[in-house]
Amino acid sequence: MRVKRDLTSAPDGPVALTIGNFDGVHRGHQAMLARLIEAAEDLRLPPAVLTFDPHPREFFSPSSAPPRLSTLRSKLALFRAYGVATTFVARFDARLASRTADEFVTQILERQLHVRWLLVGEDFRFGRGRMGDLAFLRSAAREFSVEAMGTVAVDGQRASSTAVRNALAAGDLALAAALLGRNYTLTGHVAHGKKLGRSLGFPTMNLPLRHPPALTGIFAVRVHGLGGTPRAGVASVGVRPTIRAGGEPIAEVFVFDFDQATYGRRITVEFLHKLRDEARFPDLDALRQQMIRDVADARDHFAAKR
């Protein structure tokens, strides 16, 4: 799959396109990608995706923007797995935000991307002030046809990034997994820490978080990227209130029966079960005792799943 970050760099020819932020690439997004691939094959056009980085809400209101469910890298990997030929990554900045709905259609979709078939969600809004909608898109399109994707429901609930965030915030990993079509994961490179976990008897791998996490607490997890098979462990995601007041969010992972150097390695943490909320303890010994209980509870979880 080709990734193009310059929208002025035209594709080799006409494309079938879908547009969206695709945060989390949940089951609603997956249905859109599947429909894109199907239509592209029928029309003999290469399937393409137009997505945005950063998320528009991060541009307009960074302090109140919702947590990201996926990194750009993880989204691209999922697009590739679905068979997308080209992904256009548009930098969402003041210039793009100022384009009118008509300019978006004529200059970007038609002149730059050469769209011949377009798939969007029923609630798709675009252009300056979000003035463009599905009806405007259909009336303004001169060189391409427009198809709208209906709502995808999971157990009677609309699959959406907001629904996934709400489930994760509530610690309902089963609902989040149902909406995503897979368990929720965090991916990153292991960084050096202060080795406090090792001094407490639990050497951890630290994953600094560039954005506020979609979930917090203590979890039973599987860790991928440490060998041929995933390894069981416990992850803590939060601000470590016992260690420092007002700290930055971080993910710390303790892998069972594993003590190898991992600095710089890229790992994926798969969240399976929430053990408890993050809490502040009176001292490090009380924290250590709780960590012992957390590990025992996580081992019990994995034993029950065998």
Image: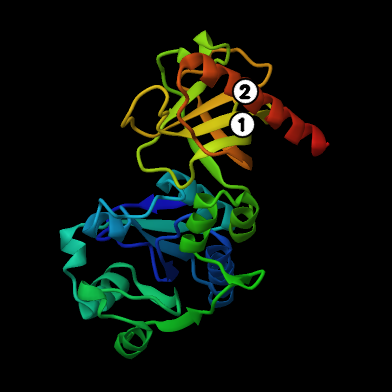
Mark 1 or mark 2, which has the lower sequence index?
1
- Label 2 belongs to which residue? 255
Residue 60: x %, y % from top left? 22, 59
- Say whether residue 274 is left or right of residue 214: right
- Residue drawn at (19%, 76%) of the image: 100
- Residue at disc 2, secondary structure: strand
- State which quadrant residue 91 falls in: bottom left
User: Furthest-right residue in view?
Assistant: 306
- Residue drawn at (29%, 87%) of the image: 140
- State which quadrant residue 222 falls in: top right
Residue 215: x %, y % from top left? 49, 45
User: Callout 2, which amino acid?
Assistant: Val
- Say whether residue 200 is left or right of residue 60: right
- Say whether residue 149 is left or right of residue 129: right
Quadrant for the C terminus in the image: top right
- State which quadrant residue 65 falls in: bottom left
Whether residue 35 is situated above or below residue 306 in the rendered picture? below
- Say whether residue 77 is left or right of residue 255: left
User: Callout 1, which amino acid?
Assistant: Val
Residue 278: x %, y % from top left? 49, 35
- Residue drawn at (48%, 55%) of the image: 165
Residue 26: x %, y % from top left? 55, 59
Disc 1 crowd, CA 10 A, few/some/many (<14, 14-19, 20+): many
Whether residue 287 is situated above or below residue 277 in the rendered picture? above
Q: Nearer the viewer, residue 222 or 39?
A: 222
Disc 1 and disc 2 in contact, CB within 8 angstroms? yes
| Total number of numbered discs in the rendering | 2
Q: Nearer the viewer, residue 14 or 87?
A: 87
- Residue at disc 1, secondary structure: strand
Mark yes or no: residue 229 visible. Answer: no
**Which disc, if any, is residue 223?**
1
